[in-house]
């Protein structure tokens, strides 16, 4: 992989899975650790709620700055004048014609979190249909530059059946999302673009910390989340020591060769800085 460069980024998200992938059957996520960098101790933003956390992952700032809540993102478009653009908007400003796409199970992300007027191809559907649509899109648009996926079901299952180890339905929902991630990766590979893509996998928060059927607290069950990535330049088996969800935007921007806005809180995680340092030494 060392001679390849990252040409595009896929951000694959599932909602509300925390780090319960450790107990669910998730061979696809498990393989991220061997293929690239992975942690089960990334930190969701606070409060550990969907709009706040996905907003941070895409806009690179803490929730108090982007101001998104579930209610706001369901009813208002993200303001054009915000000093905290999403990574989609950065990509659009750099490449007026690039293909950008956002596939979400939870529609407020496409309504109120991803900017509306910047030509992002948007689809919101239940998880299974969503992945079918996404795979058809990738087959027809292998030149896509940035694609975001959010599968909704682990969170839905947690709210209905409870989060955590005692909830088989919840663990099954995580396993189902893992299989859907696997289908997406197979499609990317078939399209011949896997070895030139950075693939990021993450979840926005967990659940069951304060309330077995909810999330939002700073309890580790709500706050600790998995996060991983692999692709050109990411050494296989790289541990990740500290990463907060907002840093996702910085990683995506870095991978696309875009400069992160100075207003972002997002920082490049240490594992990428270390690899950049090693590369700089090699070329000296
Ligand atoms: Zn969520």
Image (spheres, rainbow, N blue to C red):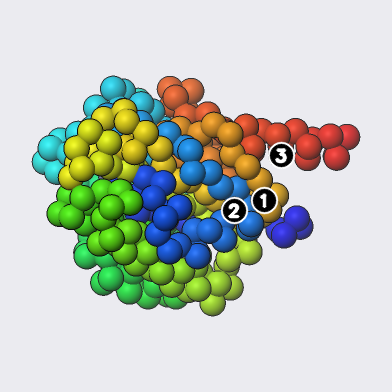
Q: Secondary structure at mark 1?
A: loop
Q: Position of residue 238 (x, y in %)?
A: 66, 46
- Closest to the observer, 59 or 81: 59
Mark 2 — residue?
33
Residue 237: give its label. 1
Residue 18 in sight in this render? yes
Mark 3 — residue?
275
Residue 191 in sight in this render? no
Quadrant hosting residue 91: top left
The quarter of the rendered structure image containing the N terminus is bottom right
The quarter of the rendered structure image containing the C terminus is top right
Nearer to us of marks 2 and 3 is 2
Side of 188 where 140 appears, left or right? left
80 vs 153: above or below: above
Distance from Cα at disc 1 to Cα at disc 2: 5 Å
Q: Please tell me which of labels 1 and 3 falls first in the chain.
A: 1
């Amino acid at each position: 992989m060392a001679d390849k460069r990252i040409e595009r980024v896929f951000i694959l998200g599932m909602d509300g899975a925390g780090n319960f992938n450790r107990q669910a059957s998730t061979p696809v996520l498990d393989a991220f650790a061997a293929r690239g960098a992975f942690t089960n101790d990334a930190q969701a933003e606070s409060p550990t709620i969907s709009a706040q956390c996905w907003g941070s992952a895409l806009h690179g700032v803490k929730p108090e700055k982007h101001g998104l809540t579930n209610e706001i993102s369901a009813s208002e478009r993200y303001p054009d004048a915000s000093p905290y653009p999403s990574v989609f908007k950065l990509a659009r400003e750099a490449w007026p014609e690039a293909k950008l796409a956002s596939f979400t199970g939870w529609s407020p992300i496409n309504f109120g979190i991803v900017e509306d007027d910047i030509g992002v191809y948007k689809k919101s559907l239940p998880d299974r249909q969503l992945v079918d649509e996404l795979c058809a899109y990738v087959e027809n648009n292998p030149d896509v530059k940035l694609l975001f996926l959010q599968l909704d079901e682990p969170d839905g299952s947690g709210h209905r059946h409870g989060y955590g180890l005692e909830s088989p339905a919840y663990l099954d929902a995580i396993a189902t999302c893992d299989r859907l991630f696997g289908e997406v990766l197979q499609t990317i590979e078939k399209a011949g673009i896997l070895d030139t893509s950075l693939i990021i996998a993450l979840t926005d928060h967990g659940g069951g910390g304060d309330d077995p059927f909810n999330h939002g607290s700073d309890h580790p069950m709500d706050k600790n989340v998995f996060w991983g990535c692999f692709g050109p330049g990411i050494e296989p088996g790289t541990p990740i020591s500290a990463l907060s969800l907002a840093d996702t935007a910085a990683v995506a921007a870095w991978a696309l060769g875009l400069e992160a806005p100075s207003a972002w809180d997002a920082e490049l995680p240490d594992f990428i800085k270390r690899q950049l340092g090693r590369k700089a030494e090699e070329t000296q």
